[in-house]
Image (cartoon, rainbow, N blue to C red):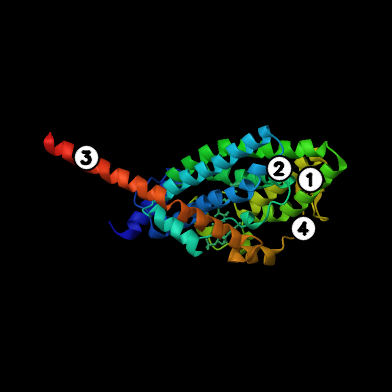
Amino acid sequence: MSVQELEKIFQDKIDREVRIEPKDWMPDAYRKTLIRQISQHAHSEIVGMLPEGNWITRAPSLKRKAILLAKVQDEAGHGLYLYAATETLGITREQTIDDLHSGKAKYSSIFNYPTITWADIGAIGWLVDGAAILNQVMLCRTSYGPYARANIRICKEESFHQRQGFEILLVLSQGTPEQKAMLQDAVDRWWWPSLMMFGPRDSESTHSDQSTQWKIKRKSNDELRQQFVDMIAEQAKILQVTLPDPELKWNAEKKQYDWGEIDWNEFWNVVKGNGPCNKQRLDARKKAHDNGAWVREAAKAYADKRKEREEKEIKVA
Ligand code: FAQ
């Protein structure tokens, strides 16, 4: 069969909503796009543990500490599902992680901002997990089977994450004037970076057209961002916080919120590695990788030994 015929069968499957599985034929560009997106998603989950991990030892009570610990462990699990999904596309986990450490692969811009106060942990749960869920609910229906299934598991845990963040903020919103001010300050700092998580404007997005045709993406960056604004603007009323956008206003005709402009210079600056914490985040990941070398060596030695024993047993039998 010619490549053109194979491509036609492939696109036809996608159009009929048949999931693509690892052993199915797929165009090289589809494979490459998925390796890029799923590995970047995995890196985001793992790097995303760092800003919150910063507060595990300082959470204000034992209960808060246990909840935060569980959440950060969930993020590690999400990273693992996603690295495993990436491996089904024929790239090794070592290569994927090397690409993160060398700066070749990106991770979400949001994790390059610092967590300065306890309210930041609430804001991450509410806004960052809230944005992540909208994106990942869409990805539960993405065309590549292993990625879709990984997202189904991830979303179940993310909804708990968002609620725990909202609850932290709800408690602060009913607290002292200092606690209310801390809440407002966190929302002021996390609002715009959260909107940036959805990626560049549709008109600037390099991959959207092709990814939409392949049903990797089912909603555009701008569509999801608008859905997020509409959801958060309503929830903000319950928390009695102001979103830091003077142009935010309900548009009765469009039945959605109008809002201001993202600082795209800031977005691209962070994506290119120049955000407030980019260097710190990558250094921390590289250090953790180096410190974990003995675990990988021990696991490999054990696997080799087991294989040797199994081979001996087969010979005897
Ligand atoms: N940051 O053409 P597009 C989480 C890059 S998980 C950095 O529109 P695409 C859980 C993009 O890679 C959060 N780079 O790209 C959690 C591309 O560059 P490339 C992560 C960004 O792929 C919560 C270029 O710009 N979620 O938060 C960003 O079609 C709390 C052009 O962009 C995912 O990764 C950005 N924000 O659409 C963990 C979901 N935006 O690769 C801990 C899966 C864009 O050509 C605590 N990913 N770029 O060099 C996606 O859905 C998509 O990849 C988008 C971007 C929507 C992010």
Amino acid at dot 4: Gly
Q: Quadrant of the N terminus?
A: bottom left
- Whether residues under marks 4 and 3 lie with C-beta atoms below 8 angstroms apart, the answer is no
Which residue corresponds to the image point at 45% horizontal and 51% vertical from the top-left?
292
**Disc 2 from disc 4: Cα separation:** 24 Å
The numbered mark at residue 183 is: 1
Q: Tell me the element at label 1.
A: helix
Amino acid at dot 2: Gly
Q: Nearer the viewer, residue 191 or 31?
A: 191
The numbered mark at residue 260 is: 4
Q: Quadrant of the C terminus?
A: top left
Is 258 located above or below residue 276 in the figure?
above
Q: Nearer the viewer, residue 151 or 3?
A: 151
Which residue corresponds to the image point at 72% horizontal and 36% vertical from the top-left?
167
Quick one: which residue is furthest to the right in this view? 177
Can you identify the residue that label 2 sits on? 122
Which comes before the other along the chain, label 1 or label 3? 1
Residue 158: name its quadrant. Answer: top right
Q: Position of residue 245 (x, y in %)?
A: 80, 55
Q: Position of residue 27 (x, y in %)?
A: 38, 57
Q: Tell me the element at label 3.
A: helix
